[in-house]
Image (tube, helix red, strand yellow):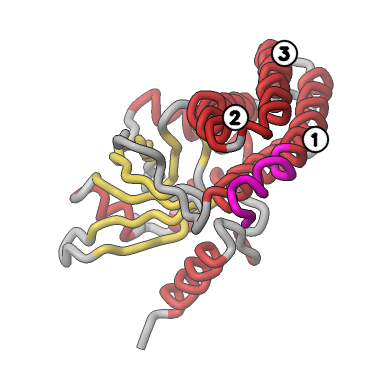
Amino acid sequence: MPHPVQNFNQRIIDEFRANHGQVGGPFEGGRLILLTTTGARTGAPHTTPVGYLPDGGDRILVIASAGGSPRHPDWYRNLLAHPHVTVENGVFTYEAKAVVLAGEERDRAFARAVESDRGWAGYQEKTDRVLPVIALHEIARPGPPNINASSPAEAIRLVHDAFRRELALIRREMESGTTTLGAQLRVNCLTFCQGLHNHHTGEDTVMFPFLADRHPEAAPALDRLRAEHEHIATLVAELRKTLADPDLDTVRGEVDRLTSELEAHLTYEEAQLFPLLGGV
């Protein structure tokens, strides 16, 4: 008979995959991935829902808390034996290399986690083991990313919705009652900015030329979208500047401005591109 924890995890996994990363219950509104590891003893794949922290660049962080259990979770023991893992974030699926952080690097990362959510400190207080912090480094692969969509239009919608959710989460974090801009919140903002830049660069250099070649009548809309990308890049640059400022109200104002402008851009882009790509 399946263990109750296995049943719970499988329900979360099924909901996550069915709803492209959105789930209810204890994970609702949080940052969640599905982490697939290779069994240390069996060699079989095991998938587990795990909360994560943005860390900029090509990596994210996960913490082997097991709710403060005295034992490391199975997925952690698995990746120690087999550090090549698979990550699903609801939009993209990619291979990654797991690296356990050590020393000051681990302590700084864990301090950021605690600063953003005191629950991590509670887990640490419940156990004598030092909770491991693991960096998951995306392994670059040739060709387009592996996106969990059945059509180009759906792919755009899923990416756009992921940006919308992350911005909403960042705004909620800014309203959480703190009066200062925490280190992890800075990282969250910078990671979002980099992801948005990468997405727009891909559209400008790959998708828009493709569409322009096949749909010359779309040239005015594509020109407007390119101009909006430049405008949003300016807003992102302003946000980056304010992240060095300890004034949370200043940062909040820039995030609100970016949110408003980006939502208008995403809505217009969807209206213009979906018909060209065959809908969703």
Element under disc 1: helix
Residue 238 badge: 3
Marks 2/3: CA–CA distance: 14 Å
How far across and down, in percent of the image, does residue 80 sit? 23, 47
Q: CA distance from mark 3 to mark 1?
A: 18 Å
On whether residue 3 falls in the magenta region, the answer is no
> What type is the residue that disc 1 sits on?
Ala
Q: Secondary structure at mark 3?
A: helix
Image position of 126 (left or right of 177): left
What amino acid is found at the position of numbered circle 3 in the picture? Glu
Q: Which residues are magenta?
A: 269-280
Side (left or right) of 224 relative to 133: right
Q: Which mark is residue 220?
A: none
Residue furthest out toward the bottom: 1
* Secondary structure found at label 2: helix
Q: Nearer the viewer, residue 257 or 28?
A: 257
Q: Nearer the viewer, residue 160 or 165?
A: 160
- Numbered label tally: 3
Q: Which mark is residue 264?
A: 1
- In which quadrant is the C terminus drawn? bottom right
